Amino acid sequence: MAGLLLLVGCTADPDGPVLTPAPSRTAGPSSTGAGPTGESSADGRSDAEFERDLRRLLVLPDVPAFTVPTQSLTAAAAQDVSAALDVAPGLYEGIGVLDARCTDAGAAAADTTTRTPGAGASVHHEDGELDVTVSADGTGVYEAPGLRVAVLPDGAGVYDDGTTRVSVAVDGSGTYRDGERRYTVRADGTGSYEDATTRVWVDADGAGGYDDGTTRVSFGADGVFGGADPGRAAAVRAVLADGLPRFEPVPRVAAIEPAGTVCGTVIRLDADVLFDFGSADVRPEGQETLGRVAALLVALGGPAAAVEGHTDGVGDEAANQDLSERRAAAVRDLLVAGGAPADRLTTRGWGETRPARPETTPDGADDPGARQLNRRVELVLLDG
């Protein structure tokens, strides 16, 4: 038996929306005036562009998803691939390695038959430096050197790798801190954001402020303070009025049973890391990941592999099918550019037809963690 643990932070959606925005509140008129929002300021941005960029800044960062084994999940071949790609056991951060499993019909997939949380007894697994406890109610703890993940009841959880720390409460409040940024979000949408150059604070009823060293403005019961021009001040006030987004609930651990027999290895690539929303153009960080995969394929002697694109189930089915095909082709092209033999790589897009996990929980609630897992490109390497 194995446990699947997904800890997923809010993100601007690549194939469907996963961000839960704060309830919209109408801001009162700014005493600074509306300002010429179509004009550009000294930084070259119009006020509308400034507001757009500020909203993007406040989107909560991604938190990696995790596949947590409660016993050895993969055959020796997949473990060798994991080691070659420097993928930590159980960790799915942009790239993961799983067994390919074949059925009597010959189909190959990395997927398994999932049972709902609460089915079966609690499980404890200890393997060297890895310690995993999965409870029957879907809560669990993952402990490894430099990494701790805890899934707590009712959607709460903690992630800490020594650099990035995320804490999510039942009500959607929480904190996110890494070496560059800090977010603090309360259940009512108030809170703050801070990095090396910019600070934003959101108080109740649209009060708060913004300071990036150039634009400084704050709003409160006593009026408006700071030297921001009217257009910039109005843009800040509009953002503050909407509040900060809440954290998504942390999905529970699900018990899974392998289906079929091991017949190869699947390298799973997170589409959120590879591509921007709705795009088949690979990001620079995605190109780096594919360079590692291409080097591995070369080292393995150029094995035959199917490059398969998948999307989540949000949006138009035909558009998702087309996007999955274009993304699979883009990944293949970069693997070939990295030295993998072109005649050994085929492509196929599955659109939304082969989800790794259902996108709703057993009680019918939306599951954003499953949607993230379903947005992926997989390289299927079959034995022989």
Image (spheres, grey):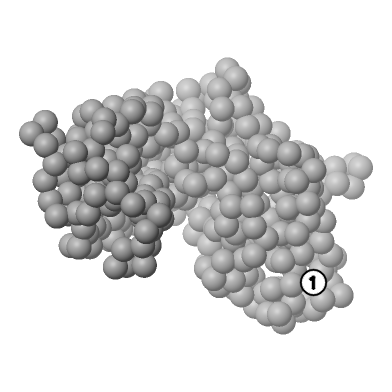
- Which quarter of the figure is the N terminus placed in? top right
Front in this rendered view, residue 235 or 310? 235
- Which quarter of the figure is the C terminus placed in? bottom right
Point 34% across, 27% down: residue: 25
Q: Position of residue 189 (x, y in %)?
A: 30, 32
359 displayed left or right of 159? right
Name the amino acid type tagged 1.
Pro
Front in this rendered view, residue 314 or 369? 314
**Rendered position, 335 above or below 316:** below
Give the quarter of the image for residue 335.
bottom right
Point 11% across, 37% down: residue: 223
Q: Is residue 89 visible?
A: no
Give the quarter of the image for residue 218.
top left
Residue extending farthest to the right is 105
Point 55% across, 22% down: residue: 365
How packed mark 1 is, by other alpha carbons closer than 10 Å (few <14, some 14-19, many 20 or more), is some
Q: Position of residue 308 (x, y in %)?
A: 76, 56
Residue under circle 1?
303
**Rendered position, 384 above or below 187:** below
Count of labels in the image: 1
Give the quarter of the image for residue 169.
top left
Q: Position of residue 317 (x, y in %)?
A: 77, 39
Q: Is residue 290 visible?
A: yes
13 displayed left or right of 356? left
**Rendered position, 218 above or below 155:** below
Residue extending farthest to the top is 363
Q: Position of residue 338 (x, y in %)?
A: 68, 80
Residue extending farthest to the left is 222
Point 78% across, 51% down: residue: 322
Q: Assign a secondary structure to mark 1.
A: loop
310 displayed left or right of 158? right
